[in-house]
Image (tube, rainbow, N blue to C red):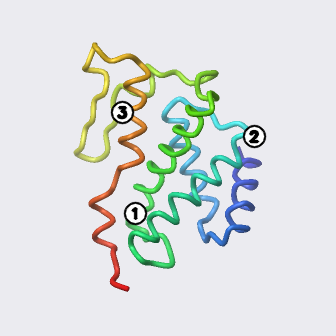
Amino acid sequence: MAEIINEVFIFLESQGSRLDKKFIELVLKRLESFSYTVKEEDTFVVGFSIIKVENKIKNACNTALLPNGLKITAVDMICGEFLYSQKQTGKLNETFDFEMAVKQIQAGDTNVTFAVESSQTPEQKLNAFISYLISKGEGERICYRKVK
């Protein structure tokens, strides 16, 4: 994992990001909690997803740095972007356990369960899960918005 963290960190630095290796490690551990093990060939996609979400949040908040209060939200958004990218390119199906990842998420006092609908296929549950991750924190970003 250390090699992947270093490669992603070098990519982030080349793009002007100020995020540190601990943040990258948090992203990778969060992906592991969703039953996805990041491989060496995933480093560019992980780095790209981090830059994409970082810029999205910084632009929405009109800030030069990612606010500390939004880092956990950013981690989930990054994971959503990464999983979406892997799914769209067909790389997610190889090693990802759809059933394991999409049953339930608990963040603080918020609990989201995806496995209740028996009429949904695992892919539909995964799509709902990825959408949830990508759109997470819309309201939280407002707290950090600065006027131009």
Total number of numbered discs in the rendering: 3
* Direction top: furthest residue: 118
For the point 40% across and 63% down, the residue is 70
Amino acid type at circle 1 is Leu
* Residue of label 2: 40
User: Is 22 on the left-hand or right-hand side of 10?
Assistant: left
Q: Secondary structure at mark 3?
A: helix
Residue 15 point in image, percent of width and height: 68, 67
* Direction left: furthest residue: 109
Gap in angstroms between the C-alphas marked 3 and 1: 22 Å
Q: Quadrant of residue 91?
A: top right
| 147 vs 133: above or below | below
* Residue of label 1: 70
Q: Earlier in the sequence, mark 1 or mark 2?
A: 2
Front-most of residues 103 and 84: 84
* Residue of label 3: 128
Crowding near the residue tagged with mark 1, few <14, some 14–19, many ≥20 C-alpha atoms within 10 Å: some
Q: Earlier in the sequence, mark 3 or mark 1?
A: 1
